[in-house]
Image (cartoon, grey):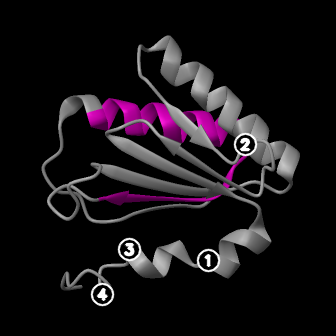
Amino acid sequence: MTRKTAPKGNTLDGSELMRTLIEKSLDADKAEDIVTYDLTGRSSLTDFMIIATGNSSRQVAAMAEHLREKLEAEGKSVSVEGADQGDWVLMDAGDVVVHLFRPEVRSFYHLEQLWSPQAVGAHV
């Protein structure tokens, strides 16, 4: 598993715990290229954004379902879009937003470029 984490800011304990739960779930489901962005202070929408890849539509949909079950078991409300197709699944858990892709779809949309430190004006 490859995991990259963007620089950390000040985060709430709850969002940190949710981020950890999500990363562990994705790792257990054999997600690839897991990238976590700490957006605290950079976005009013969420504290973390996590992007990961599954090798097939079936794997992407299964990762989303497992993750939804785990978050709901912790009392979190989760909105899920795209799970029927399994090409790009967007999961919004409030403090953490998760994007799950098939490899071709991830490379087409290049979300990492939108949220890279250079794209938001941070200094590297």
Can you identify the residue that label 1 sits on? Answer: 109
Say which of 77 and 41 sits in front.
77
Label 1, label 2: how many angstroms apart (C-alpha)?
17 Å
Question: Can you identify the residue that label 4 sits on?
Answer: 118
Q: CA distance from mark 1 to mark 3?
A: 12 Å
Answer whether residue 26 is magenta in the image. Answer: yes
- What residue is pinned by disc 3? 115
Of tags 1 and 3, the one toward the viewer is 1
The Cα atoms of the two marked residues, 4 and 1, are separated by: 17 Å
Quick one: label 4 or label 2, which is nearer the N terminus?
A: 2
Residue 3 drawn at (x, y percent): 53, 58
State the image coordinates of residue 53 (x, y, percent, origin top left): 69, 58
Label 3 and label 2: CA atoms lie apart by 23 Å
Residue 118 placed where, x, y %? 30, 87
Foreground pick, 32 / 107: 107
Q: Which residues are magenta?
A: 15-38
